[in-house]
Image: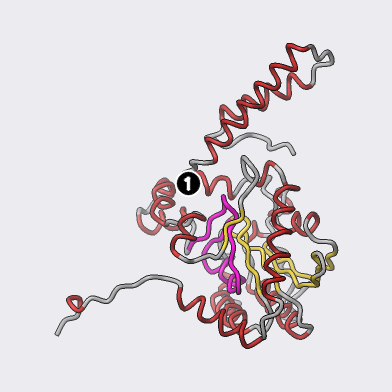
Amino acid sequence: MSNGPGLDFEIEIAELESRIQELERQTERTNEVEAEIRELRLNLVEHLRETYGSLNPWQTVQVARHKNRPYTKDYLNLAFDEFVELHGDKHFGDDRAMLSGFAKIDRFKVMVLGHQKGRTYKERAACHFGCAHPEGYRKAMSKMHLAEKYKLPLICFIDTPGAYPGVGAEERGQAQVIAESMFKMSRLRIPVICVVIGEGGSGGALGIGVGDRVAVLQHAYYSVISPEGCAGILWKSHEFAPKAAESLRFTSKDLAKFGVIDDILEEPLGGAHRDHHQMASRMKTYLSKTLASLENKTSDELVTERYEKFRRIGVFVESPESYVS
């Protein structure tokens, strides 16, 4: 698919892609033109492999936010066989930033929850740029209860810079409802799989992030706060966002090293935004395999192992010298 303007570290890649497209549009394809196209394609693959094999944390954030990166709806269309959307929280309204519904993937019937950002500006505004309100998390909890009632595994796609920070959201209990959602997920007696497909920012991500298996796409990030938010607090300026990204250690490799996540899903060369179908195929394979590994566990085993899993996350050191007598 067309990727539009490249990222700021993709200048040479964009030039190679532009040249290849220009040559492929020629009506007369001589042997010399074909040879040049082959050489340019080899150079493009080499540049993509070199560039995306050494992304720094801030570049990873840029890739995670790419406007053509596949969203929850894209995976539902490409990786799942069926999807029936469910709306509303029965209290306030339907939050379009939180997508929910019944779905089927291979032989498994599941419930899907996921953040949705939207493609066009109109869609993004309607979806609050992927930042869910309290009614979004209440909708999510309602569908968790429904999934548990019918013994359907739960799949959550995480892609948000954070929960909506507006006054109205705070007035309707944003922090409380996220805490309730996390608590409910910790006690669900069904298999729960969570995948960070783009941005995994703050409590907005954790609100649907407590699962038996937590995976992150190779070029996604999962963090207690966005780089801009961290920079604003520590350095009083968003200009320090790249420095904050470096300090937060939120890339997939860091998260796996610290034991925060269980799996890393490798993306197509050049990022998931370059090949939605291949990324969806890898997602389907991962979800099917993981669902099969969890289906024979009892409800008690799922709850106990989930509890123990999250209790193990994090490292701390107690030193006798640190205590004051």
How many dots with numbers?
1
**Magenta highlight on residue 207:** yes
Q: Residue at x 76, y 48 (%)?
A: 277
Location of residue 108 with respect to 124 vertically, above or below? below
Location of residue 157 with respect to 26 vertically, above or below? below
* Left or right, residue 105 beside residue 97: right
Location of residue 241 with respect to 110 vertically, above or below? above
Location of residue 132 with respect to 33 vertically, above or below? below
**Residue 159: percent from the left, percent from the top?**
62, 59
According to the image, what is the colour scheme of the structure? secondary structure
**Residue 62: percent from the left, percent from the top?**
55, 45
Q: Residue at x 69, y 22 (%)?
A: 38
Q: Residue at x 72, y 47 (%)?
A: 278
SS at badge 1: helix
- In which quadrant of the rendered view does residue 163 lie? bottom right
Please provide the residue range marked out in magenta.
Answer: 199-223
120 vs 280, nearest the viewer:
280
Q: Which residue position is annotated with label 1?
A: 58
In this view, the residue farthest toward the bottom is 300
> Which of the image's four quarters has the C terminus?
bottom left
In this view, the residue farthest toward the left is 325
**Residue type at mark 1?**
Trp
- In which quadrant of the rendered view does residue 130 lie? bottom right
**Residue 106: percent from the left, percent from the top?**
81, 64
> Which of the image's four quarters has the N terminus?
top right
Q: Residue at x 56, y 27 (%)?
A: 12
49 vs 130, nearest the viewer:
49
**Magenta highlight on residue 305:** no
Res. 56 visible in picture: yes
Res. 168 visible in picture: no
**Residue 116: percent from the left, percent from the top?**
69, 59
